[in-house]
Amino acid sequence: MPLEAVEPRRLYRQVADQLRGLIENGEYGVGERLPTERELSERLGISRPTVREALIALEVEGRIRIRVGSGIYVTAPPLRHDEDSIFEGEGPFELLRARELVESALVREAAALAKREDIATLDAVLGTMERGNHPSPETISLDRQFHVAVAGILSNAVLVRFVGELFDQRMTPYFERLSEYFETGETWRLAYEEHRIVRDAIAAGDPDGAERAMRSHLRNSQIRFQHGFGEEAGTTRSGGRTPGRVKGRDGKAVAQGSNGR
């Protein structure tokens, strides 16, 4: 039998698998509330962004419903789902961290090379962005245009394609669901202002300032997706029972429920 390449299982997939297993085994019934993001993060010994990636995956799959300001609730299982398609590709925060590293380096070079026509291209995109109504396919396209235009200053088709492909990986159910919760006209205004700061640093021929501005922008993008889902909703399941068993990073069970399962 031919051997197949072994792909390490991403941490958020492991978390999602554990939570799905608890739901399927009846540890959490339909309508019951899961532990909060904070609780899951502390009990699993992992970051909250990783927990959020797992929760978003389960919501897209139809296993849970996140109610901002209330909590995370189990829903009736879908009639059918394609788990493999749900888990294709990287998680949103992994992607944004990669973009932060890559584009911060690129913009530094761009600031040293930019010509008048390059600044004019950025200004044209920003002029349209300023009038955008976010979130929408049009504003997402403009966001992409700006980042690709920055890469284009380096006159390297490989880098332009790479930045565009990195951006396009946000066109997934993950980002669509995150956008529903956290992207608004206000977040678009903040993002626009951050793009403007990047542009100004490039126009000033300031590599250090351009790198700081791009890193800050992409870091802020991550932060905007990390506001709580309503931690004030409480820390126990409906009916007063404590949360069920979840395995930590070392594989040991933690947060065991009162029923001993």
Image (spheres, rainbow, N blue to C red):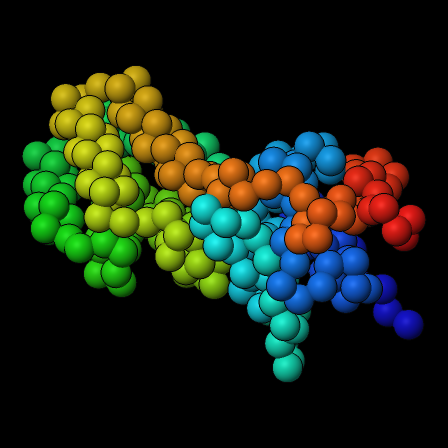
Residue 5 shows up from this direction:
no
The residue sitting at 63% across, 72% down in the picture is 76
Quadrant of the rendered image containing residue 104:
top left
Q: Is 215 situated above or below 163?
A: above
The residue sitting at 79% across, 64% down in the picture is 26
Asked if residue 86 lies left or right of residue 150, the reply is right
Residue 143 coordinates in the image, percent (x, y)? 26, 49
Asked if residue 233 lies left or right of residue 135, the reply is right
Extreme residue in the bottom direction: 79
The residue sitting at 8% across, 34% down in the picture is 116
Residue 51 coordinates in the image, percent (x, y)? 61, 44
Residue 247 coordinates in the image, percent (x, y)? 81, 43
Residue 190 shows up from this direction:
yes
User: Residue 53 versus residue 71: which sits nearer the camera?
Assistant: 71
User: Residue 239 versus residue 5: which sits nearer the camera?
Assistant: 239
From the image, which quarter does the N terminus lie in? bottom right
Extreme residue in the front direction: 239
User: Residue 214 versus residue 4: which sits nearer the camera?
Assistant: 214
Count the labels in the image: 0
Residue 105 coordinates in the image, percent (x, y)? 39, 29
User: Residue 156 versus residue 252: which sits nearer the camera?
Assistant: 252
Asked if residue 222 lies left or right of residue 191, the reply is right
The residue sitting at 88% across, 51% down in the picture is 259
Q: Is 111 situated above or below 195?
A: above
